[in-house]
Amino acid sequence: MNYNWDWNVFFKSTGIGSEIYLDWFVSGLGWTIAVALVAWIVALIIGSVLGVMRTLPNKLLSGIATAYVELFRNVPLLVQLFIWYFMVPDYLPESTQVWFKQELNPATSAYISVVVCLALFTAARVCEQVRTGIQALPKGQSAAALAVGFTLPQMYRHVLLPQAFRIIIPPLTSEFLNIFKNSSVASLIGLMELLAQTKQTAEFTANMFEAFTLATLIYFVLNMSLMTFMSWVEKKVRIPGMMGGAK
Amino acid sequence: MSMISIKNVSKWYGDFQVLTDCTTDVKKGEVVVVCGPSGSGKSTLIKTVNALEPFQKGDIIVDGTSVGDAKTDLPKLRSRVGMVFQHFELFPHLSITENLTIAQERVLGRSKDEAMQKGLHYLDRVGLKAHAHKFPGQLSGGQQQRVAIARALAMDPIAMLFDEPTSALDPEMVNEVLDVMVELAQEGMTMMCVTHEMGFARKVAHRVIFMDRGCIVEDCAKEEFFGNIDARSERARQFLSKILQH
């Protein structure tokens, strides 16, 4: 293969002010983090509520949560994004539509769409993990919680969820990483996150290999740091005398 | 005065009947031992008393409150009845002191100090004060079960339910738990105990109930149950001959 690698490309001027190509990557990374983190927080909240709902004795509530999960995890993420970005705005009330399509900065409307999409998609997956975490607990735990006089909400709050969340930290970690990787779909609706900036750099400079190598490296380092952070959290909340915890 | 009154209780899992027309009474200060072969419905019966197991027919009155009544505040009722489980069921993510205090604070609304004082008092009574700062996973089975008893006592229960409290323990640890239970019985606590520990039954029980296939087959005074074996039902004699042999 005859290719002239040129790593200096990132320090070359883009021709816009004093900007260099590396600045594009930094800004892209910023958007990636902004999308993924906000979507993750929302997904964690909605997913936990749904996960609890799936374990409730109430058939209607658990049925709603099950339907949600089946809907959101059986439709491709990209299809969901296009629905949220291209279709849903058309069904908003007139005034909201004008606001979303015309008054809002295009980057902001794309940002909102992708955050909503990723959050709701990931919530379905978080839901399943929270549900399995709760169901993995011995049945006697809920019996004991009820026996001391806890109400159903107290039982979840003080007994079931603190244990369930500890159990599911490893699968939650991989979901946390997934949301960062999945955020790259935003490039397809014009949000200039990391992947979009990479493609743009590749097109402007013709140094495609360097651009994608750098993007790969950034994603890799980002996810490795998140993983390290999560294993720190896991150690931090480990229960003494349990699951290999410190004696 | 009757503390727990079980009246014609029947329960089904689908088509399968697990309790058939069970009727019995536990008076204030009385210790009743429930025994019987596995699958006879003893655990199910004791769990209907604090509504951990629902039932379809009959009623149970605990200190004047109907368990079967849809209007009954079940959490409140349960907070007044202590329960000890076969597998201890301490909350593993909470320290021993938190296990002892959390329900006192969250359910009874006691202050942190009051709950702590009460919790430590009972922890001392079961001989485990030195372990207050530990977590359940760091204690032996017998110690965990004693903490579980202290946790129930800290709620100032009007009665205690024991669901095979020594069945999951190593033989060496059975006695430390039974000792606590004997003491409790001698102090006049109202107790309903599902157990195979016939030595315990002989020592402190007032009455013995024998169950088989969901029915209460025998319900009589301890002296009668153990002393007049010839008058027992065929099934009860069979059961006793098997567990009293060794």
Image (spheres, rainbow, N blue to C red):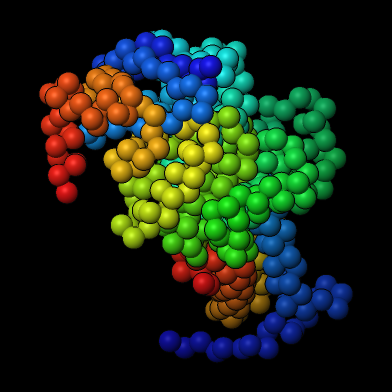
- Front one among A162 and B208: B208
State left or right for residue A26 relative to residue A61.
Answer: right
- Above or below for B105 versus A10: above
Q: Position of residue B50 (x, y in %)?
A: 50, 26
**Which residue: 44% across, 50% down?**
B179
**B143 on left or right of A14:** left
- Residue B55 found in image quarter: top left
Rendered residue at 77%/50% (across/down):
B113
Q: In the image, residue B226 lies at what x, y percent?
A: 24, 31
Q: Position of residue B147 (x, y in %)?
A: 53, 52
- Residue drawn at (32%, 29%) of the image: B222
Quadrant in which residue B9 is drawn: top left
Residue B6 visible in the snapshot: yes
Left or right of A27 in this view: A60: left
x and y, in percent, of residue A87 in the image: 63, 34
Left or right of A233? Residue A34 is right
Q: Is residue B58 above or below residue A155?
A: above
Please report the residue visible at 71 percent of the width from the left and 51 percent of the height from the top: B116
